[in-house]
Image: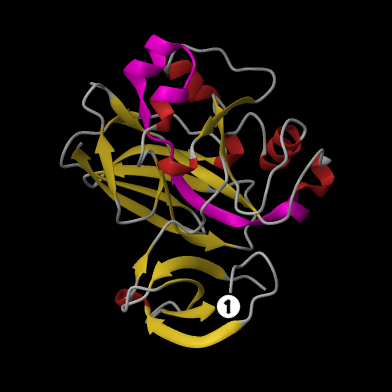
Amino acid sequence: MAVRIARFATPAGGLSWGVIEGDDAPTVAAIEGHPFASIRFSGDRWALPDVRLLSPVLPSKVVAVGRNYAEHARELGNEVPETPLLFLKPSTSVIGTGDVIRLPADSQQVEHEAELAVVIGVPAKDVDRDKAFDHVLGYTAANDVTARDQQRADVQFTRAKGYDSFCPLGPWIETVLDPADLRVTATVNGAIKQDGRTSQMVHDVAGLIAFASSIMTLLPGDVILTGTPAGVGPLKDGDTISIEVEGIGTLTNEVRAK
C-alpha cells in the first residue's frame, strides 16, 4: 500500500514519524517508532498545517551522483562518466522543507540542483540490480546545493557540497512510485530554472543502488541523490527555491546569507 511518510514536530514540540492521509484536508497520523519496520499507529493525529515538517529521514550518509544527466554534464563542460560518479554529503547537511539554506561567506557562486532522492529501507550490500527495489523504502525530493566556485577550485566535492543546510530533503517520502520517468523541476522566486525527467538519467535508479552497494553498505534511512537535469543556477540571499518531483510533492526553502 502506498503511503506518504513524514517526520515532524508536533504542536507541543515532540518529534515523531507519521503517515500523511487525505488530500483536500490532509492530516498526519503518528506512528510508533520508525517507519523501517511494520507501521503501527499510535492514535495521535493532527491537521497537517498544525505540525512542522522536518527532513523525512536522518541518514547516516547521503550518496550523491554527479553528471548523471548528459545535458547537465555538458552545461558545466564535463564528460559523462562511464560508471556513476559518486560523492558523499554529510548527514549534517540535511534540512527539511521550510528550513533555511545558509549561504557560506566564502563562496560567491552557490547553485541549486533539483533531484529525485531514493530512501533506503532495508540494508543493501552487493545488491543485484534486479533486486534493487527490494531495498527501497521510497522517494523524496532533494536539492543538492553546491558552492560551484569551490567545486571548481577544489576539484573534489567535499567542501562545495558539504555545508550545513546544503541538502534539503522533503516534504515527505512517497513509498510507491515508479522512478523511471518523473518530471523534476526547480523554481526560483516563481520562475522555472530546471525542468527535466528521470528518464534522461545516464544511470537508472536500480543501477545506482547496485553500484553504490557494491562499494559501501547502504543502511535504512540512507539517501541516494540521483543527479540533476540541466539548468542549474545561482541562489542569492532572499531567494525562495522550490524543488518539485512528479508524484511526490514540493520541497521549498528560503535562502539567507550566513
Instruction: Name the residue: 61% across, 67% down.
Output: 35
Say which of 249 and 253 sits in front: 253
Say which of 152 and 25 sits in front: 152
Is residue 32 in the magenta section? no
Say which of 186 and 254 sits in front: 254
Give the left or right position of residue 18, taking residue 208 as reference. Answer: left
Image quadrant holding the C terminus, namely top left
Q: Position of residue 172 (x, y in %)?
A: 48, 61
Seen as rendered, the residue at the extreme left is: 238
Give the left or right position of residue 13, taking residue 236 as reference. Answer: right
Q: Position of residue 219 (x, y in %)?
A: 67, 48
Crowding near the residue tagged with mark 1, few <14, some 14–19, many ≥20 C-alpha atoms within 10 Å: some
* Colour scheme: secondary structure
**Start-end of magenta stretch:** 133-159
**Residue 255, quarter of the rendered image:** top left
Give the left or right position of residue 174, taking residue 255 as reference. Answer: right
Q: Position of residue 113 (x, y in %)?
A: 41, 35
Q: Position of residue 100 (x, y in %)?
A: 27, 48
**Residue 256, quarter of the rendered image:** top left
Image quadrant holding the N terminus, namely bottom right
Instruction: Name the residue: 84% across, 41% down.
Output: 128
**Element at label 1:** loop
**Residue 235, quarter of the rendered image:** top left
Q: How many numbered circles does the render carry?
A: 1
Q: Amino acid at mark 1?
A: Glu
Question: Circle 1 sits on which residue?
Answer: 32
Q: Compared with residue 15, is residue 107 higher up or lower down, i.e. above or below? A: above
